Every structure is written in C-alpha cells, then in structure tokens.
Amino acid sequence: MAVLNKIRQRSVFLIVIIALALFSFVLADLIRNGGAISQKAENVIATINGKDIDRTDFAREIEKASRSFGGGSNIQTVNYVWNQELRKVVFEEQFEELGIITGADQVNELIKETLSNDQRFQNEAGVFDKGKLQEFVANLKATAPQSYRDDWLPFEISIERQAKEKAYLNMIKAGVGSTLKEGELVYKMENDNVDIKYVQLPFSSIEDAEVNITDAEIKAYVDAHADQYKAEASRSVRYVLFNEEASQEDIDEIKGRVANLLDDKAEFENGKTDTVKGFRNVENIKDYVNQNSAIKFDDRFKFKKDLPATVADTIYNLEVGDVYGPYKDGDFVKISRVVAQKQIPDSVKASHILISWVGLGTAGDTKRTKEEAKALADSIVGVTNADKTKFSALASEFSADSSNKDKGGDLGYFTPGAMVPAFNDYCFDNKTGDQGIVETQFGYHIISIEDQTDEERAIKIATVAQKIEPSEKTINTIFTKTTKFQISAKDKDFEEVSKENELTVRPVNNIKELDENIPGLGARRAVVQWAFNEESKIGEIKRFDIPEGYAVVQLTAKSDKGTMTVKDASLTVKPILIKEKKAETLKSKISGTTLDAIAQGQSQTVKVASALSMKTPTISGAGTEPKVVGTAFALEIGSVSKPIVGSNGVYVVEVTKKTPASGLDTYMSYASQASKTQAGLVNSKVFDALKEAAEIEDKRAKFY
C-alpha cells in the first residue's frame, strides 16, 4: 500500500516523464526521416513563383506523354512536360491578374476546331457533328468513368487554358504595331542606296599567333559582360570502356560448333544407332535452318550483289547442293548451302489494283465481305484482260492502295524481295503483259506486269548462323580486369593506369545537370546523376554497367552555377579580344587624309562598292559589314570617314553618291508588314519573358 501511495503522489511526474519519452521517440523518427518538411520537399519536383509542382502529378503527366510519344528518350519527355507545366503556371498568374476568363461558347468552338478532322465526330459528308461529340462524351462518362476523369476532363481543361492564352496573347498583339513613320523607315532601309570608295585593312593581315591574350584580360571581359556569360552548374568526367567482346578462342569454339552441323552423325538411342542428317545432306532444309540458326530461313532468290560482300564471289559461284563455311559475317558465324537457282529479271515494273474487305487494315470504310472482294477482283481482271487500257481508270475507282491509285496503280520498278512473298513471286515468275490475282495480308491484288529488265542468275541459299557472343569465361575475365583497374585507378593516376592497361581515356567536359547522353556511351542518366550527387568528390571513381560491358568513370571537375570560368569562356572570348587588339593595331597604322594615301601606306588598293542598302549591308569584296554601311549613310558626299572597326577588318570610306528612294504616297503596306513581323514574335517572346522573370526552384535532376 505504501508503494501505491507513493505512485499516486508522483502520478503527475510520471505522466510528464512518459510524455517526454514519447515525444523523444517521435522526434527521433522525424530526424531520421528528414522531418515532415523534408518529406514534403521529397514530393515537390519544382517550385515556380511559390507554387509547388507535385512529384506524383508530374510523374503521371510524364507517363501520359510517354504513351503519346510511343516511348523515346525519358529526359526529353521530362523536359517536354516541364515546359508544359512551366507555361501553365506563368500564364495562369497572368490570367488571374488580368481577370481573363473564357465562356462555354469559346471553349466549345476551340474543341470543334481541334477535333474537326477526327472521323469519329464527322457526319456522312465529312463535316464535324456536334451531336456525335456530345454522344461520345456522354457514353464515355457512363461506360468508362475513369477514362472520362483521366483523359477527357484534362483535355477540356487544356482547351480552356488554350482559349485564355489565345485571348491574352491577342491583347498583347493588339498593342504591337508599326506607325506609318516606321513603315517609311523600313521602306528607306530597303530602297535608299549609297555608293562608296573604301580601303580595307583586313584582320587576316595579322596572324592570331602574333596577338597575346592573357587569362586576366579574358576574366576582365567576362566580368564586364557577366549577363552574356552566365553558366549552369556542370561536371566533367573521364572514362574507359571494358567491352564484353568474344575472344578469338570464343570465335574458334563457335566455328567448331557450327562446323559440327555440316556432316551426318550417328546417334545411339534405345539400343540402336540412327544416322542424323547434317547440313550437307538434310532434305527439309527450311526446318533444319529454323531449328539450328539464330536467323530464320530466307526463302528468296538473291543476286550476287545481295550476298555478303566478303564471300559473295565464292558463294555465288557454288553449284546447287554445294556448301561453304564456316565463315565470319559481322556478328555471326555462318555456313551456307545453295538450294536452288534460276534466271529471273533484275527488276520488274508492275501496276496493281488492291481490293480489300472488312477486317483488314486496308479496308477503310468498305463493307464488302471477302467473298464479295474476290468476286469484284475476278470481274475487274476479266475487264482488264479484255481491254488493258481500262486498268488505270479501274485502279482510280476501286483500289484501296491510296499511295498509287491516282497513278493508275503504278508501282514503278522494284527488285526481288521488295514486295510481300506472294506478290513478289507472281511478278518474277511470270512474263511482261501477264495479269493475275494474288492474295496477301492486304487483300486481293490484281497485278499487271508492265516490264521486266534483263534476266540474271539468282540463287536461293540456306544459311545456319550462330551469334558471336563472349563465353562465361571471357565475361568473368573482363569483370576481373575491370575490377583490378578500378582498384588500381583509385590508388594511382587514372591516366597512367589506363596507359599501362592499353585503354583509351575519353574525357567529357561541361555535362549539365539535366543532360542524358554521354558521348561514346549514349543515354546514361545514371552517370550524370552520380556526377552531380553532392557526395561525389572530385577524383572519385565508379563502375557502371552498360549493354556493351562496363564503363569506369572518374569525376574530374565540378563547376557551380554562376559566371563562366576563364577556361570555359576562353573559346568565345579570346577571338573577340584578338579582333579588338588587331583593330587597335591596324588603326594605329593608318596615316594620310585621302584614301589613296592610306591605301598606299598599307599596300592596299582603293575599292568601289555601289548601291549599298541598310537592309542588305554587304560590301563587294569585303563581306557583310552593317557598321561600315551605316556609317556611310551618315556621311556627306565627298567626306572621308575616320577608321571604322567592322566584322572583317578596319575600314576608311568615302561616299561618292547617295540615291534616296523616290518615296510612296503611303507606307501602309510596309507598316502592316512590320506589324505582322512583330506580332509573329509575340507567342514565343512573351513566354520567354515570363519564364525569365519567374522565380524557379527546379529539382527535376534529383528524380530523373
């Protein structure tokens, strides 16, 4: 009882202790899992102007887009969906701020425009039928509510958004235009002309090697033009490849295995010995090839030019029944046997009329049965056999092959094997002028053979092919070699270890966070993600499995987002600075007040250029020089300019003649054209501007 009394006296204290223990447990769990805030962040793929883009919703859109695109590059799909989401957010803000709304009529009209060519919603005359659309939506809602929610409703929302976007952009376009004065300026830039004499001191007269550019000068230029030299975060790596390729021992083993198929074998089974026919003697050659070869039997006649180039002469000269091999052809070891030969045309010219029936992919709107299609084909061939001149008109009227029905069914010339087997055999087994009916998976073909080129010997060959693949022993050897290299490269210099192992080191610089392709490796997002992982250190090495084997990759450099480094900017900045220094040197060499004196002093000649305009500022003998031409228009006739730094050199010009345009009564057409040009830029420029102004936290690279 004393103990119970003590517990009762301390009950409040015990409750506090238990509560603290529970709180500590929950807090520790939150810390271990990054906390509630962190978990929320894990579900956000980006934040645009304060609006979070949910990771699950984003993934759902990627899945839909991927289905629509039929697969393809995952990162390209990610970027496509990202641009869609970004556009949606920045435009929605504008809609809300300006109070832009759309009525049901606007949305319905846009839906009509979008679906006008969809045959499901057209009447018998091929015109959009609103009733059919309403019936489709009602049926979808009743029978497939999930599809209605996941597909149709988002489609309606996207159409509504398009209507708002159209209204928003139209308002901006209404404020974009050109005045008559601006139209007059456009006219003058096209039609005012000036004639000049000039002396050019080309930049090419000074070798680039003679101009010294320091890193400090490049940095100063970059700092002064920081907006032009912004850099994304980037990484640089280098790697070596370990390809899982078959060794010569593997190839020899495969050749031996294939060679064993050539001759008959005695097999002992159930107390008796049976002879199993080999490739040389087997009678059912097609089944034999299909059972023993990685490439199925090809039941076509081939000319010499169709055979593998390295063995064409040998195989083509074999007699029926002769065998050649084993031989290596690409990624296969093969044995070949000539099974037939005949003389066939090198190519055939033919026309056809395709008669289809319900159920075939070529049927279109036809309702005829297969029996009705056969009767129609028989009827047509009866007519064309009696009067060949009617073939073209009947093809235009009845053929289901829209690619050539308007050409009278003309297929042009084609070589053996270009058509499906039954069609091919008819054309090459019969003679010019023959007509007949052939059935294929496309329907009944009424074929007319128009012409056949000279006949040549063609052979049918049976080939057993087995793919050249590395053995398990070779695969294990390559893995061991890769592992040893990886261990050595961690302790020594990557380049030196590569040389010791006779491996080629391949550097890849300036990889961006959302890049997918690594030159020489293809699509390798795993490499990019590893390179950008905060825990990956410069010098760190990692092995990646690739379809060809392994790539051992070393991270060589990290560059954060900001201004370009001197090294990265040098490629574009150095030529600019070289040109600037050349310009100063050339300007300092100019002396004299006349063109003749300047030209003589620099061993140049005075050149002439006529009818220059501001719109096309190209100077004969010098190239495109807008600054030089613009300066010439500002000079008086007879005036000599000061040195002008152009695109291709330093110039001194003298204006010899000015020819103003005659002028127009009105410049409306020029103003209108200028307005259209500006309005045409609105769609892309507005989105670019909104995107540039947006505050974006992009985490895509973390998840994809």
Image (cartoon, helix red, strand yellow):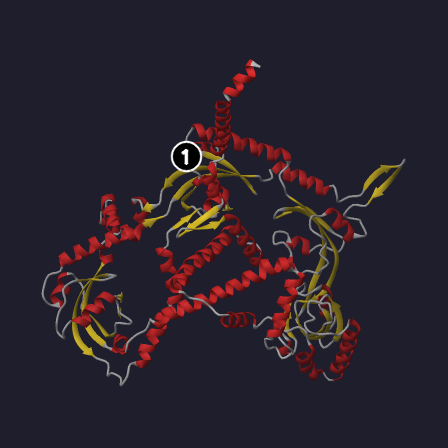
- Residue lying farthest to the bottom in this orientation: 665
The amino acid at mark 1 is Lys
Horizontal and vertical percent position of residue 242: 53, 38
Residue matched to label 1: 537
Residue 509 placement: quadrant: top left
Q: Residue at x 27, y 78 (%)?
A: 180
Instruction: Note whether residue 16 is visible.
Output: yes
User: Left or right: where does residue 630 sit relative to residue 341?
Assistant: left
Q: Residue at x 75, y 81 (%)?
A: 385
Q: Secondary structure at mark 1?
A: loop
User: Left or right: where does residue 116 sit relative to residue 221?
Assistant: right
Please count the marks in the image.
1
- Residue lying farthest to the top in this orientation: 2
Image quadrant containing the N terminus: top right
Horizontal and vertical percent position of residue 248: 61, 38
Instruction: Note whether residue 518 is visible.
Output: no
Horizontal and vertical percent position of residue 566: 29, 45
